[in-house]
């Protein structure tokens, strides 16, 4: 899973993150905190309203995607790389 948005609260998105980067983001942005009901070491809850601009949110989504791909098995990475664009 790369991201999660609760239907009851679409203003928040939960994104996977490198543990050190997750802490850095939480220190820098009030709108980023450890994700509720997720392992807070790896997951951030990001407010889509407030102090984080759209460019940064898109960067965090891309980072989350990369973190998930990085954990794929060799076989799954090969299958993923063979998918059409």
Image: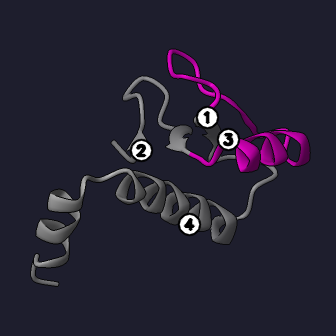
**CB contact under 8 Å: marks 2 and 3:** no
- N-terminal-most mark, 1 or 3: 3
Is 32 within the magenta? yes
On screen, residue 82 versus residue 77, left or right, reads: left
- Quadrant occupied by the C terminus: bottom left
Q: Nearer the viewer, mark 1 or mark 3?
A: 3
Q: CA distance from mark 4 to mark 2?
A: 12 Å
The crowding category of the residue bearing disc 1, from other C-alpha atoms within 10 Å (few below 14, some 14 to 19, many at least 20), is many
Q: Nearer the viewer, mark 2 or mark 3?
A: 3
Q: Position of residue 16 (x, y in %)?
A: 52, 43
- N-terminal-most mark, 3 or 4: 3
Q: Position of residue 5 (x, y in %)?
A: 42, 36
Q: Which residue is mark 1?
A: 45
Q: Residue at x 68, y 46 (%)?
A: 49
Q: Residue at x 41, y 58 (%)?
A: 70
Q: Position of residue 41 (x, y in %)?
A: 64, 29
Question: Which quadrant would residue 7 be assigned to in this image?
Answer: top left
Q: Identify whether 13 is placed above or below 65.
A: above
Q: Which residues are magenta?
A: 17-41
Q: Residue at x 10, y 82 (%)?
A: 84
Q: Nearer the viewer, residue 28 or 80?
A: 80
Q: Which mark is residue 58?
A: 4
Q: Which residue is mark 3?
A: 19
From this viewpoint, which residue is outermost toward the bottom?
A: 85
């Amino acid at each position: 899973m790369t991201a999660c948005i609760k239907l009851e609260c679409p203003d928040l998105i939960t994104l996977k993150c490198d543990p050190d980067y997750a802490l850095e983001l939480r220190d820098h942005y009030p709108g980023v905190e450890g994700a509720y009901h997720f392992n807070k070491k790896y997951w951030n809850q990001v407010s889509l309203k407030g102090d984080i601009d759209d460019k940064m949110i898109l960067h965090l989504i891309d980072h989350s995607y990369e973190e998930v791909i990085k954990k794929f098995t060799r076989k799954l990475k090969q299958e993923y790389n063979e998918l059409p664009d």
